Amino acid sequence: MAGLRLTKVTWDNVRAACALEIRPEQKGTVAPVAVSLASAYTVPDIAWPRLVYDDDQLVGFIMGAFDPDGEIELYRSFLWRLNIGAEHQGKGYGRFAVEGLYAEALRRGRRRLVTTWSQHEHGPEGFYVRLGFRPTGERHQGEIVAERILAPGEPGGEYPTE
């Protein structure tokens, strides 16, 4: 895991990012990276899209949203999207990406990170619960809302970003 890093989406890596494929049974549980990047383009001051690399290999994509003064509380500090390539799942890359987003949220002075998911046989609920997200009892656009309360020094370690 020494070569793991989060990096910005650039002209040089955007095509590879858009080609990232999740497992077939997960389709419909998360938008493709290209759709996420199109969404990020519409709100560049809010979206925080990053690619997950292990050395020189692209293994995933994460996108947060930070809108501290926004009308919708959900998006003030939000894990918006997470896509880990099918062949790279189960190797700790998703955890690394989410912990990198935690670190960014803390850097921005946020103490709460929120995400949503739809209940689906192959959905991400178990993964997010293992990472400390707890359902709030709310729903947003039919999806379960969950939060993780962040504390300084959490998560342990540094998360290299570019």
Image: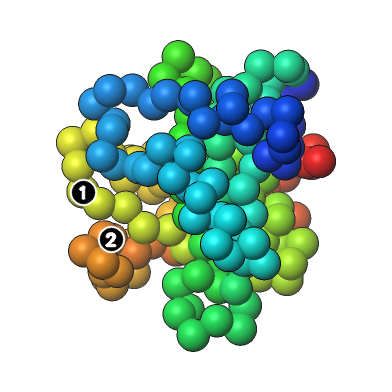
Q: Determine the secondary structure under disc 2.
A: strand
| Above-or-below relation of 8 to 147 | above
- The crowding category of the residue bearing disc 1, from other C-alpha atoms within 10 Å (few below 14, some 14 to 19, many at least 20), is few
User: Can you say which quadrant of the picture contains the C terminus?
Assistant: top right
Q: Secondary structure at mark 1?
A: loop
Q: Which residue is mark 2?
A: 144
155 or 81: nearer the eye? 81
Rendered location of residue 23, percent (x, y): 33, 23
Distance from label 1 to label 2 (Cα)?
8 Å
Quarter residue 127 falls in: top left
Question: Counting residues from the N terminus, which is met first, the one under dot 1 or under dot 2?
Answer: 1
Can residue 88 be seen in the rendering of this structure?
A: yes
Check contact, mark 1 vs mark 2: CB within 8 A: yes
Could you tell me residue 57's position as x and y percent? Answer: 66, 16
The one of 106 and 22 positioned closer to us in this rendering: 22
Residue 123 percent coordinates (x, y):
28, 39
**For the point 45% across and 72% down, which residue is it?**
74
Identify which amino acid the numbered label 2 is placed on.
Ile
Q: Which mark is residue 119?
A: 1
Q: Residues within 10 Å of mark 2 (few under 14, many from 20)?
A: some
- At horizontal 45% and vertical 14% (from top left) the residue drawn is 87
